[in-house]
Structures are given as C-alpha cells and as structure tokens.
Image (cartoon, rainbow, N blue to C red):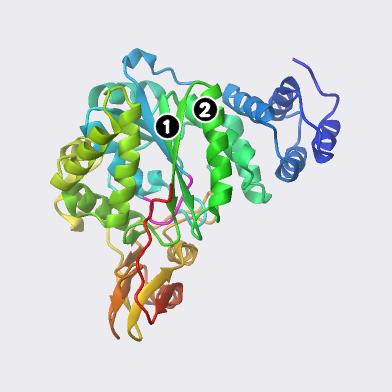
Amino acid sequence: MNKYVAPVDFIQHKRDGGEHAGGELRAFINDYMAGKVADYQMSAWLMAVWHRGLTLDETLALTDALLASGRRLDLSGLGRRVVDKHSTGGVGDKVSMVLGPLVADCGAIFGKMSGRGLGHTGGTVDKLESIPGFHTSIDSAAFKQQLGEIGICIAGQSADLAPADNRLYALRDVTATVDSNPLIAASILSKKLAGGAGAVVMDVKVGAGSFFKTRGHAHGVSHLMREVGKRRGIEVEVIMTSMEQPLGHAVGNTLEVLEVVQTLKGNGPDDLVDVVVALATRLLTLSDLGWSPEQAEKEARRRLSAGSAMGKFNQWIEYQGGDTRFIDDPGALAAAPHREMVRAQGSGWVESIDALAIGRTALSLGAGRRRREDKIDHSVGLLLRAKVGDRLEPGSELAEVHAADAGAGRDAAAAVAAAYRISASQVEPASVLLD
Ligand code: URA
C-alpha cells in the first residue's frame, strides 16, 4: 500500500485538484480510524472533496476503505439472494414498511438495515419503534436467522458495519459536506455491501423536501451508484421519485405506521402505492424468483389491493417483538393529546405543498430530532387531508395537526397553512414517478 507523507500533504493535494492513489486513500481512512488523523483534518479533506470531487477510481477506493473499516455480513448460507432497498430520505416516506412485507409475501427475501432520522426527514427505525415492544437491535446471527425463517427483517444499522462511514457522516453533517455525489455514493454503497444483499434498489428523491433539489443532481449520483455497484458485485437499480410534496397523507411516526396498515389493507394513497409498486417491481425482478417485470408488477399490485401482504406484516411485527393489536385497533398506539384542524380560507385547487416546510413543522412538533441525542415523540405529526390537485372550498380541511399541547398545535397549524399554495385555476397532479 502506498503511504502519503503527512495528512496535511494529502489534504493539500486534493485542495489543489490532484488525484489520490487508491492505497493512499485507504491509508488516510485507516489512519483516521486509528486516531492518527484528527477530525479537523478529515473535515478539511471532506471540504476539499466537496469542491474538487473524486474520480471513479477514487470513489471505489473510498468505498472499499469504508467497507474494510468493519465487518461484512455473509448471507450466502441462506442459499437465497437477499434484496434490499434504500431511500435518500424524504418527508412522509414510509415505503420500506409496506414494500418489505409485500415482496416477502411474494416469496423474495427482504433484508434491510435502516438508519434513524435526523433533521426534517424521518427514519424507518424511529417509525417502527412507535409500535410497543418492537425492537430493531438485531445482531447478524439473528438477522440471518430471521431472514431464513420469515423472509423479512428490518434492523437498525449495525455499528460494526462500515463504522468509518458512521464517523465520516457525523462530520459531514456538521461541516456542510453531505451533498457531494462521490461521498454519498461511497457512503451508501459501503453500507449496502457490508449488509450482504445481492441487489439493491435505490429510491432517489428529488425536490424541495429532499437532498437533491434537481433531477440533474439526482441523475449524477444515480449513475455513480450504479457504476460503483457494478464494479463491486452488487446489482444497483435506481428509481427517481418526486419529493415536491410529502408522500401519502401522514407525516410523523405513529401516524405513518397507521397509514402503512391502511396501505397494506388495500386503502393506500395513490402516490404511496405508485412508489411501492415501482420499487417492488424492480426488487422482485432482481430477486431469485425468476419473475419478469410484467409478472412482478401485476403480482405486487394485486397483493396490495387485495390486502394479502397483511399476514406477512403481522408475522414480521410479531417476530420483532411488536404488539400487533394496532393492526385492527389504531387506538392501541399512543395518540397525541391535542388536535387542530387547518382549513382553507378561500376556494381553488392545491397547487403545491412545501415538503421541506412540512418536514420542519413535524420536527418542531417533536416528531424528529435536531441532534442525535434528542428524544422523539412518536405520537405527534400531521395528517395532510388535501394534496396537490384537490379542489378546495372555504373551510375545506387542509391538514390535521397532532400535537403535545395547544400552543405547539397553534404554531404548527400556522406553519402548515403557509406551506400550502392555492391556485385559482385547476391543477393536475404530476406523477410521483420521475424516471
Ligand atoms: N445517506 C447515506 O447513508 N449517506 C449519505 O452520504 C447520504 C445519504
């Protein structure tokens, strides 16, 4: 392995637009993990990368170094191909909780490690923890066993898989260096490779409520993730979906879990169903079932509208310790003490709903965390009664705020009203599927 001379030379090389040799890059990451490179030096290098970028070879070397910093799950003993899904994060994104049981009900093996939410986007693990008793701390032996027995597991991100990414991500989060395509691709792919899946479908969100504000930016990172996947032996497919308005109606942990149940019973909102079916079609086609895309789409749609994946959902929640009474009785989950309805002032059509503003409002209600150590309130959030394209009359319901108290409810109601833009002329909702 070639070795750089000193961290400062390495940082300067990238600052001045140079390219790193793979061995040097790996040594730099190893030295960081060994405490020989300081956080401030790593932060400076990350900023140099943000400005100068990384070549494909450098991105591959970084992916390898992040992966090599921890263990790699070996799922080959299952004798089945495990499929995984990753979202770049959005508002109201409860897709994994519908998609997982749906593809497992079709006979595929769905294994996913998921993060906690930070900032205005929620995390699947936090949402699942709204269910009393449900646990997500699952070690690799139990992860494997569960996949073998019931075909689905969603666990918290294990600390010993790609630990260098964990540390780098924490620095990126506070140094304005998250939104760099090569850093994103290496971060996501190192974790996916460590998790042992054979194929992964990425849901790259585009729009106000997501990381990628434009399709151009999303295209760049999608291409790079496919390329890194191809060269490291994991099939990566990418779909792009809109995050111009929140997905579905519910935003907030318990409320989203209840919307998942409705969707699995066949009564889901159209945009959520469209995203789930698009992802299921690709996952089932990439799995070892040998299905064509046409068969996969037909079967996913049929099972979703017939409510037939509900049994798999029930089995999965029970397996991970959850009390399943909420499936038939929504009141079994803790509800927020205060509700406030936001109503339209005039008539017209909903033209847009600012997803970022909605995400931030849910965060201010306590549904998310600003810092990693914050506690979240699972019961609070928003139910958007009107979505883009809906016709409004004066007094029509726009959204219901679920808050911890009246003051928080009032503040949130004002913020939600401001997030709705109303048009005097008819608005046709655009498809949530972009590519
Ligand atoms: N999600 C990740 O896991 N890593 C990134 O860099 C960005 C989003």
Q: What's the amino acid at mark 2?
A: Gly
Q: Earlier in the sequence, mark 1 or mark 2?
A: 1
Residue 28 screen position, x and y as percent: 74, 27
Residue 266 falls within the magenta-colored stretch: no
Exactly how many numbered labels are in the figure?
2
From the viewer's perspective, is residue 234 above or below residue 89? above
Give the numbered dot on residue 229: 2
Residue at image location 58% in from the left, 43% down from the top: 220
Q: Report, in whole angstroms, how far the alpha carbon at label 1 lies from the one at label 2.
A: 9 Å
Residue 67 screen position, x and y as percent: 57, 25
Residue beneath disc 1 = 200
Secondary structure of the residue carrying tag 1 is: strand
Displayed-image quarter of ligand 1? top right
Nearest the viewer among 253 and 88 is 88
Residue 368 screen position, x and y as percent: 45, 56
From the viewer's perspective, is residue 420 above or below residue 65? below
Magenta region, main secondary structure: loop
CB-based contact (under 8 Å), mark 1 and mark 2: yes
Which quadrant of the figure has residue 333? bottom left
Secondary structure of the residue carrying tag 2 is: helix
User: Going by the image, does 238 lie left or right of 382?
Assistant: right
Q: Residues within 10 Å of mark 1 (few under 14, many from 20)?
A: many
Residue at image location 67% in from the left, 26% down from the top: 57
From the viewer's perspective, is residue 48 above or below residue 137? below
Residue at image location 55% in from the left, 55% down from the top: 214
Q: What's the amino acid at mark 1?
A: Val
Q: Residue 160, can we see it?
A: no
Q: Magenta span covers which residues? A: 88-93
